[in-house]
């Protein structure tokens, strides 16, 4: 409630996990996305098993996922999370944006597929847009209790 007794509905931040084997990429994405209003980077992972574990434990809204992640790759992560009702929106990032990889990722449940080398700005715009929509929506997101 605000001081006048009106019920207010503060939206929690969109929670993001970044999975990439390159520490510099994880840091760079975390810095870029962490500057967006309404976005909180809550964790990161360096390989596929870590990514699956952290997503299951922290239940983020968004997973920024490297396609060529050690330990099974981004496809293994997408496959492991596919049937989980709490699975995040997955944004696959790659330096090898070929059509077959794109199709495989979408078939495995990815929401977006971006070229790391040319679409970093698109990632920021996408997440910023999702954050704006989240803040403006009056509906509960699927991760909120009750």
Image (cartoon, helix red, strand yellow):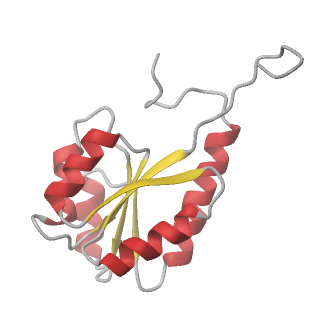
Report whether residue 47 is seen: yes
Q: Is residue 80 left or right of residue 129?
A: left
| Viewer-proximal residue among 98 and 145 | 145
The residue at 14%/56% (across/down) is 49
Q: Is residue 1 above or below residue 31?
A: above
List x then y, in percent, for residue 100: 23, 72
The residue at 33%/55% (across/down) is 110
| Viewer-proximal residue among 20 and 42 | 42
Q: Quadrant of the N terminus?
A: top right
The residue at 61%/64% (across/down) is 35
Residue farthest toward the left in the current orientation of the protein: 71
Q: Is residue 24 above or below residue 103?
A: below
Q: Is residue 125 left or right of residue 17?
A: right
So how many labels did they put on this image? 0
Q: Is residue 34 above or below residue 9?
A: below
Q: Is residue 134 left or right of residue 96?
A: right
């Amino acid at each position: 409630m605000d001081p006048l007794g009106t019920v207010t509905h503060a939206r929690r931040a969109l929670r993001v996990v970044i999975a990439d084997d390159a520490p510099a990429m994880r840091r760079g994405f975390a810095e870029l996305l962490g500057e967006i209003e309404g976005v909180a980077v809550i964790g990161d992972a360096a390989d596929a098993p870590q990514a699956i574990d952290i997503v299951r434990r922290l239940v983020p809204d968004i997973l920024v996922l490297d396609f060529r992640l050690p330990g099974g790759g981004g496809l293994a992560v997408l496959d492991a999370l596919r049937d989980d009702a709490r699975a995040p929106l997955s944004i696959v990032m790659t330096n090898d944006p070929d059509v077959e990889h794109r199709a495989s990722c979408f078939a495995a449940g990815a929401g977006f597929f971006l070229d790391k080398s040319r679409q970093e700005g698109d990632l920021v715009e996408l997440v910023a847009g999702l954050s704006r929509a989240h803040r403006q929506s009056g509906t509960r997101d699927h991760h909120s209790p009750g």
